[in-house]
Image: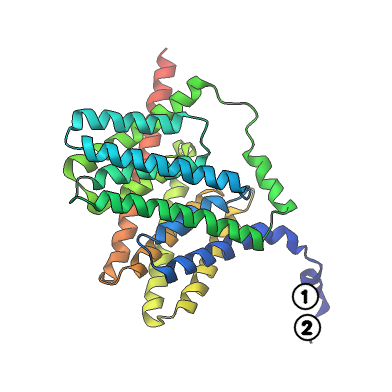
């Protein structure tokens, strides 16, 4: 028989406080499973993008919010596709327009962060793929919308199973902004992000590096985290992403030995609880574990979805994502350094 001293803590534990973590891990695993079974193009992006809708403090969307999100994203994708199709052959016109679009997306306070994230990915991916044979950018634009739709629908379905609870309120308080950010502050923030994205954009467009699209996507995702300007946070971010990548490699190697989808689900649950338990904490570096889990999902999802790539592709994905993380961390650090130096010299 079990000792009562062991059973009592379990019996008396308030399981309601674990709802956010359980929702996060089980929800993302469910989304990862559904998208893997459906197998639509770039389906591995859905679970990564859905992370933001089940993250600490994220509230369920209303139907109006979800519909508005999709309509605005569709409009952005259509405009980006049309401009890319007509002006891609005129880089001196097109590139400034693209930079203005990126600047505006980060500057405006009309869009929530998740919509900005989807919009930036579209603004980075669609124009670059317009350099490829005709039809590729249109195909990708449609599938970005499909991924966004699936991320919204599946994440809100998760909230139906695990409703919003009192335990979630603690994370909302941490995310509140006391005052509305001024126009100048928003412009300075948007300008800094553009300065970070600009070298990567020029490099990818000049040399047509569409094969490294994963790097550009991750640079866009990470650029929305100004906390990376802190050197200590940057180091932890690099470590968390490499750790997530290594977990993905181990998971892939195990799946080669046991190629069962049920086993893949169990591995995702295990890694999800490792990262999720640290993400839903009061630690200052807690948010970086969400990015580490995103790295795991992105690498494992992209490799398992591909039928013609060898296991070496897993290492390739890890290297690409590591390059993106290191670049963004260094870019933020340099930008922060020169701005502080400028302020001191005044």
Residue 243: name its quadrant.
Answer: bottom left
Numbered badge on residue 222:
none
Residue 142: where, in percent of width, then height? 35, 52
- Image point (38%, 82%), residue name: 257
- Label count reads 2
Q: Which residue is mark 2?
A: 2
Residue 24: name its quadrant.
Answer: bottom right
* Relative depth, front residue between 47 and 253: 47
- Compared with 191, 73 (above or below) is below
- Dot 1 falls on a residue whose secondary structure is helix
Q: Which quadrant is the C terminus positioned in?
A: top left
* 129 horizontally vs 345: left or right: left
- Dot 2 falls on a residue whose secondary structure is loop
Q: Which quadrant is the N terminus positioned in?
A: bottom right
The 10 Å Cα crowd at callout 2, few under 14, some 14 to 19, many 20 or more, is few
- Compared with 158, 101 (above or below) is above
Residue 263: where, in percent of width, then height? 48, 78
* 107 horizontally vs 13: left or right: left
* Relative depth, front residue between 292 and 77: 77
- Image point (69%, 51%), residue name: 168
Q: Is residue 289 visible?
A: no
Residue 17: where, in percent of width, then height? 72, 58
Q: Is residue 238 visible?
A: yes
Residue 203: where, in percent of width, then height? 22, 40
Q: Which residue is mark 1?
A: 6
- Image point (45%, 24%), residue name: 187
- Compared with 92, 74 (above or below) is below
Kindly check if marks 1 and 2 are in contact, taking CB atoms under 8 A apart as contact.
yes
* Relative depth, front residue between 295 and 71: 71
- Image point (49%, 55%), residue name: 151
Between marks 1 and 2, how big is the CA–CA gap? 7 Å
* 154 horizontally vs 310: left or right: right
């Amino acid at each position: 028989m079990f000792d009562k001293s062991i059973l009592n803590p379990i019996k008396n534990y308030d399981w309601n406080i674990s709802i956010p973590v359980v929702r996060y891990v089980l929800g993302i695993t469910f989304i990862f499973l559904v998208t893997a079974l459906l197998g639509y193009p770039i389906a591995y992006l859905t679970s990564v993008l859905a992370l933001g809708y089940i993250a600490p403090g994220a509230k369920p969307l209303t139907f109006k919010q979800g519909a508005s999100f999709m309509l605005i994203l569709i409009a952005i994708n259509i405009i980006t596709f049309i401009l890319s199709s007509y002006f891609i052959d005129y880089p001196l016109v097109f590139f400034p327009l693209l930079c203005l679009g990126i600047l505006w997306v980060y500057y405006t306070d009309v869009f929530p962060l998740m919509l900005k994230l989807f919009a930036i990915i579209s603004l980075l991916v669609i124009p670059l793929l317009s350099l490829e044979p005709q039809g590729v950018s249109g195909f990708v634009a449609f599938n970005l919308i499909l991924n966004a739709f699936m991320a919204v629908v599946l994440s809100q379905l998760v909230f139906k199973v695990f409703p919003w609870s009192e335990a979630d309120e603690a994370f909302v308080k941490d995310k509140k902004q006391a005052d509305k950010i001024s126009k100048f502050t928003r412009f300075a923030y948007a300008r800094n992000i553009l300065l970070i994205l600009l070298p990567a954009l020029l490099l990818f467009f000049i040399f047509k590096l569409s094969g490294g699209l994963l790097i550009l996507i991750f640079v866009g995702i990470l650029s929305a985290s100004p906390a990376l300007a802190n050197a200590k946070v940057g180091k932890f971010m690099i470590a968390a992403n490499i750790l997530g990548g290594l977990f993905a490699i181990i998971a892939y190697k195990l799946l080669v030995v046991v190629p069962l989808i049920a086993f893949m689900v169990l591995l995702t649950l295990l890694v999800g609880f490792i990262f999720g338990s640290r993400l839903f904490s009061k630690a200052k570096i807690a948010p970086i574990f969400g990015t580490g889990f995103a790295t795991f999902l992105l690498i494992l999802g992209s490799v398992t979805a591909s039928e013609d790539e060898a296991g070496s592709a897993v290492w390739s994905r890890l290297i690409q994502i590591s390059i993106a993380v290191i670049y963004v961390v260094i870019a933020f650090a340099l930008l922060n350094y020169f701005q502080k130096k400028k302020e001191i010299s005044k």
